[in-house]
């Protein structure tokens, strides 16, 4: 089954075309093509994602990305040219649908006369969690394509996307499984009894782990997003300083009875340390980055081990942007044993992307084909959507 994936929940405008086969028992995926526009450089000057700007960039870039994505895709010749003759009524409908995304409407009107209906069986789009303004652009884009080409829409939870992102490379997932999701907005432990059966069993009480990386980076005067910067500095310190640990930071809630996390105390402790140092040199930045990263790794691994014991999971899946961090990847790979498979997505699928959304769409359709009958009118953005 060929699926078009659309992801616009934050600052990446991402599209993809994948082929899914094998159903729920042995899902297999081929990524046919991807098209991505990263807004990171645009948001950098604000030190974080600016929702209005994210929305406008998504609106401007979706159609050019689609054009690129479909440029060498076979179209369904039976239905070819359907879009060259858009009636006034259809144009009015689209204008109404996209009245808050004028850039999207304009680019679509230019593109449609040159486009044929592509050979795609479903459109998977993120409907939450994320920035609502940004989510709406992707959703309305999906609705417009559904209206023109009559391709059904599957609405996808972004966090489910981060979980299933391992399926492009994993052979088989044995259940029960446990997922640790670590991104800029989330830190969650999720018990998975089977595909689409998710239960959040632990989460952060304050900052998400990626958020803590970004905030500590800002304290050190590093550009946004700070995760990769901290990671680089910490790595450098390990190479140059070997085993020496100059700074040790607290590990909040590490031995609490539950499976929850807290990163705000760690962040504050880093702040107080920085304030006490008269001059923050490059070397000190490296040492602080390393002390911080070590504390994060310790908390994440300890809590995850506890959750593995509690759930009896046979597979551990890690997802979300923070697993791009090589130290964290390595620490989790060390948990591999005869009784535990550890699955981590390939680096390109760790941060936000459309492939994981299309894969989640395929899983949902395989579980319940009825999802293809969802009335697109009922799909709306849900900024605080939970698993
Ligand atoms: O999953 P993601 O792309 O977006 C959200 O859904 O939030 O995650 C982005 C987060 C950012 O906080 C970023 O700093 C962090 O992932 N990140 C990293 C690394 N690469 C990205 N954190 C630590 N080390 C990295 N190498
Ligand atoms: Zn994400």
Image (tube, helix red, strand yellow):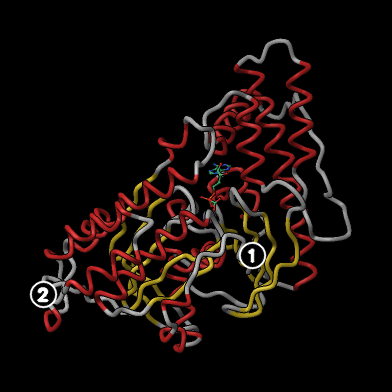
| Residue behind mark 1 | 179
Label 2: how many Cα within 10 Å (few below 14, some 14–19, many 20+): some
Q: Quadrant of residue 357?
A: bottom left
x, y percentage for residue 115? 15, 66
Residue 219 sits in quarter: top right
Residue at horizontal 41%, vertical 77%? 376
Quadrant the C terminus occupies: bottom right
Residue 143 in picture, x, y percent from top left? 36, 71
Q: Nearer the viewer, residue 346 or 155?
A: 155
Q: Residue sitting at 64 percent across and 54 percent down?
A: 186
Task: Please say if 14 is above or below 364.
Answer: above
**Which numbered circle lies on residue 374?**
none
Q: Is residue 29 left or right of residue 82?
A: right
User: Which residue is pictured at 61% across the width and 31% down the height?
Assistant: 217
Mark 2 C-beta closer than 8 Å to ligand 2 = no
Residue depicted at 49% across the width and 64% down the height: 165
What is the secondary structure assignment of the residue under circle 1?
Answer: strand
Left or right of 372? Residue 17 is left
- Residue 178 position in % (x across, y down): 67, 68
Which quarter of the figure is the N terminus placed in?
Answer: bottom left
Mark 2, secondary structure of its residue: loop
**Given this view, does label 2 or label 1 mark the residue nearer the observer?**
2
Q: Which mark is residue 81?
A: 2
């Amino acid at each position: 089954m060929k699926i078009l994936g659309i992801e616009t929940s934050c600052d990446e405008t991402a599209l993809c075309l994948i082929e899914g086969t094998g159903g729920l028992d042995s899902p297999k995926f081929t990524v046919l093509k991807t098209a991505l526009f990263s807004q990171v450089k645009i948001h950098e000057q604000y030190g974080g994602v600016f929702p209005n700007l994210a929305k406008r960039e998504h609106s401007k870039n979706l159609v050019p990305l689609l054009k690129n994505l479909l440029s060498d895709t076979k179209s369904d010749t039976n239905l070819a040219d359907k879009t060259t003759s858009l009636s006034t009524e259809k144009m009015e409908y689209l204008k109404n649908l996209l009245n808050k995304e004028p850039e999207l409407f304009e680019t679509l009107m230019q593109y449609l006369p040159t486009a044929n209906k592509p050979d795609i069986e479903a459109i998977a789009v993120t409907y939450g969690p994320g920035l609502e303004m940004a989510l709406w652009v992707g959703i309305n884009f999906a609705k417009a394509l559904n209206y023109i080409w009559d391709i059904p829409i599957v609405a996808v939870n972004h966090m489910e996307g981060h979980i299933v992102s391992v399926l492009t490379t994993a052979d088989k997932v044995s259940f029960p499984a446990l997922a640790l999701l670590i991104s800029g907005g989330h830190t969650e432990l999720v018990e998975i009894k089977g595909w689409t059966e998710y239960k959040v069993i632990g989460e952060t009480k304050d900052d998400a782990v990626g958020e803590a990386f970004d905030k500590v980076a800002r304290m050190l005067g590093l550009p946004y997003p700070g995760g990769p910067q901290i990671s680089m500095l910490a790595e450098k310190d390990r190479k140059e300083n070997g085993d020496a640990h100059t700074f040790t930071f607290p590990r909040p809630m590490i031995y609490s009875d539950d499976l929850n996390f807290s990163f705000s105390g760690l962040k504050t402790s880093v702040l107080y340390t920085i304030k006490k140092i008269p001059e923050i040199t490059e070397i000190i930045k490296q040492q602080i980055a390393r002390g911080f990263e070590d504390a994060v790794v310790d908390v994440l691994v300890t809590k995850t081990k506890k959750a593995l014991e509690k759930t009896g999971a046979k597979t551990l899946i890690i997802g979300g942007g923070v697993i791009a961090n090589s130290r964290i990847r390595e620490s989790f790979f060390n948990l591999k044993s005869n009784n535990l498979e550890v699955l981590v997505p390939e680096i390109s699928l760790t941060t936000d992307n459309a492939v994981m959304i299309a894969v989640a769409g395929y899983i949902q359709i395989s579980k319940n084909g009825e999802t293809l009958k969802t009335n697109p009118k009922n799909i709306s953005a849900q900024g605080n959507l939970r698993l």
